[in-house]
Image (cartoon, helix red, strand yellow):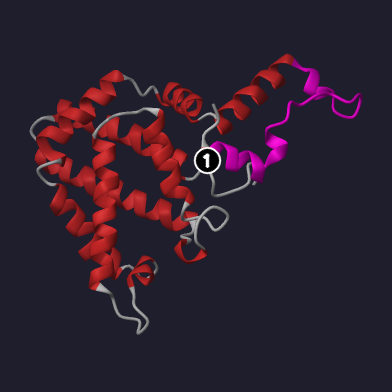
């Protein structure tokens, strides 16, 4: 069954939902089995969120071992330090960033502390969903929805955040978390490697799904 986001995607890019058939000599590549196989994977992973997760997981070798490592790191480190991590991201990084801080300003151009608190609370909900380690359709559609509401075609133009800024922020959170892990587990290199490897894979999975609706597939 197509989800609401998948249906919206197909309405926006209807040509991607159609079965491709060769019309003759101009496009014989469509009759090549390898091309058809690749096209079907591309189409299926564009419209079915779980097929996308499965395909990307296979590419990244994201397995149950990685899920177990993330759960362990959450229990030992992330959960006890979550408030500290959120405070740093919002009260030290975001409100001081020359680009990202504009989303936290009021009409006078000053940082709105109340709005920062609102965004921090919503980010906490997002992180809490991540650390549940429940990689089901509901979770991935939630990740996709969070990304889509920041795209004018699906969300509110006032909430639009350019993709490069999203990636910059995810990259910052990634390295900030890893620096914390590196300090906490500097005497346990095997555990540190296990944790950082698992989180790296998960970050890429989330970044991919988060940005599904940012660009037309051909861009």
Res 36 → quadrant: top right
Q: Position of residue 167 (x, y in %)?
A: 42, 51
Considering depth in this image, is 68 or 17 the residue closer to the camera? 17
Q: Position of residue 187 (x, y in %)?
A: 7, 33
Reply above or below: 26 against 128.
Answer: above
Res 120 → quadrant: bottom left
Viewport quadrant of the N terminus: top right
Considering depth in this image, is 76 or 122 the residue closer to the camera? 122
Q: Is residue 219 left or right of residue 185?
A: right
Magenta-drawn segment: 5-32
Q: Position of residue 59 (x, y in %)?
A: 46, 24
**Pointer 1 residue:** 5
Q: Position of residue 155 (x, y in %)?
A: 50, 56
Reply above or below: 196 against 65.
Answer: below
- Asked if one can make out residue 185 in the rendered structure from this viewpoint, the answer is no
Q: Residue furthest bottom?
A: 108
Q: Magenta includes 17?
A: yes
């Amino acid at each position: 069954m197509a989800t609401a986001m998948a249906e919206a995607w197909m309405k926006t890019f209807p040509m991607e939902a159609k079965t491709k058939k060769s019309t003759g000599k101009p496009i014989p590549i469509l009759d090549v089995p390898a091309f058809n196989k690749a096209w079907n994977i591309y189409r299926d992973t564009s419209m079915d969120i779980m097929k996308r997760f499965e395909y990307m997981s296979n590419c990244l070798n994201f397995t149950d071992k990685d899920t177990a490592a993330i759960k362990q790191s959450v229990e030992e480190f992330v959960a006890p330090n979550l408030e500290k991590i959120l405070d740093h991201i919002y009260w030290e990084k975001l409100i001081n960033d020359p680009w990202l801080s504009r989303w936290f300003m009021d009409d006078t151009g000053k940082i709105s502390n109340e709005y920062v608190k609102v965004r921090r609370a919503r980010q906490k909900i997002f992180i809490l969903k991540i650390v549940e380690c429940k990689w089901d359709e509901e979770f991935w559609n939630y990740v996709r929805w969070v990304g889509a509401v920041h795209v004018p075609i699906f969300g509110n133009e006032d909430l639009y955040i350019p993709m490069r800024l999203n990636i910059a922020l995810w990259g910052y959170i990634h390295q900030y978390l890893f620096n914390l892990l590196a300090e906490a587990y500097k005497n346990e290199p095997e555990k540190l490697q296990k944790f950082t490897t698992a989180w790296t894979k998960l970050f890429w999975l989330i970044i991919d799904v988060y940005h599904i609706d940012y660009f037309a597939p051909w861009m």
